Amino acid sequence: MEQVAEPAIRTQLLDRRRRLEDAIGARRENTGLQDLLREVDAALERVDDRSYGICEACHEPIEPEQLRINPLIRYCLPHLTADEQRALEQDLDLASHIQRELLPKQNLRQDGWEIAYHYQPLGPVSGDHCDVIPQEADGAGFFFVLGDVSGKGIAASMLTAHLRAIFRTLASGGLPLNRQVARANRIFCESTMSEHFATMVFGKAGAAGEMEIVNAGHCPPLWIHGGDVTPIEASGLPLGIFCSGEYPGKTIQLGPGDTLLLYTDGFSEAANPSDEEYGMERLSRVAMSHAARDPQALIGTCLDHLGAHLGGAPKQDDLTMMAIRRSA
């Protein structure tokens, strides 16, 4: 079972302790803060005696995802109280609602482009992310983003929201795309725990059919054009691996009917009962065979083909796909 890194947890707990002491000093008497401080100290003691992350009821490891959400937790999911379980369910429902509200509108049309996407979390919330950001000036095109944050559940969904805010802020600043991605990487790296990273594709589409793409360690998008399919390979490391790095972009020119197909590894790595992954090559063949379809229909065809490949095997990961077609 995946374990939460103790040095990182200790650093996080010490930071919380310092902030609590500052708050208590400013407010003098606050029983709630004093109680919370005692909980933090108890968690630090568990780190020191190597019992941190062990359920006090069954003595089995607590789910790492739950520890990331609440580093003070002392019980695994089956041993939470009824009130704690209800609170967790409410948090998940709220997180799911918020994450879906942050998704772009479906079936967008702008400046000669058609855009559609499919977003399917494995659970209530997802570590996948997609976004479309129109530029303010008329005829200026739009930015698009699709990617996958390491991990699953609420912690991963919080990081996707964090990345969304970072890139939306940078997209309005007028920087070249490669510098936006480099700056997003630095902000993400400096503001998250070292175990987290994100593979992402960032793009900028113009009104004349030009498209610049930066692939930060993600599955290669497929450029479907002229009876051929060209993968756009990664040009930089995933975000969060190193705080500094270069992210060179690739510029392509899409003509009428050309499509860019983006997807997360929940699609390409989906395996059938024989443990055979779907794979990029299979997706490329399907995409080329149905290149004339509009974005929503193309995504639907790809999903149908994936379902046939799975043969009833359950999905093991979040799944997101976006199709961007040049219509004029």
Image: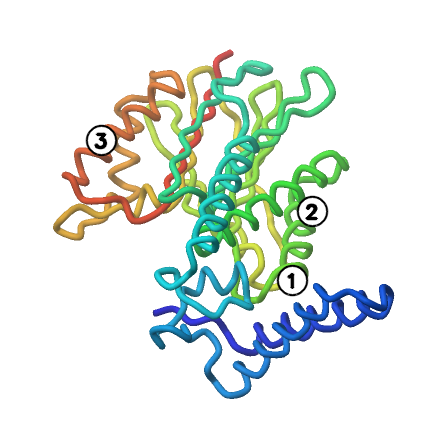
Helix, strand or loop at mark 3: helix
At x 53%, y 22%, the residue is 105
Q: Is residue 219 above or below residue 291?
A: below
Q: Could you tell me the amino acid type at mark 3?
A: His
Q: Is residue 40 above or below residue 67?
A: below
For marks 3 and 2, the one nearer the N-term is 2
Q: Could you tell me the amino acid type at mark 2?
A: Arg
Distance, label 3 to label 2, CA atoms, is: 38 Å
Q: Could you tell me the amino acid type at mark 1?
A: Cys
Percent from the top left, x then y, of residue 181? 64, 47
At x 48%, y 78%, the residue is 52
Q: Circle 1 sits on which residue?
A: 243
State which quadrant residue 212 falls in: top right
Percent from the top left, x then y, of residue 41? 63, 78
Q: Residues within 10 Å of mark 1 (few under 14, many from 20)?
A: some
Q: Residues within 10 Å of mark 2 (few under 14, many from 20)?
A: some
Helix, strand or loop at mark 1: loop
Helix, strand or loop at mark 2: helix
In the image, farthest residue toward the top: 328
Distance, label 1 to label 3, CA atoms, is: 39 Å
Q: Is residue 55 toward the left or the right of residue 8 in the image?
A: left
For marks 1 and 2, the one nearer the N-term is 2
Q: Circle 2 sits on which residue?
A: 179
Q: Circle 3 sits on which residue?
A: 305
- Residue 234 in view, yes or no: no
Q: Is residue 117 toward the left or the right of residue 136 in the image?
A: left
Closer-to-camera residue (155/60): 60
In the image, farthest residue toward the bottom: 49
Percent from the top left, x then y, of residue 252? 52, 32
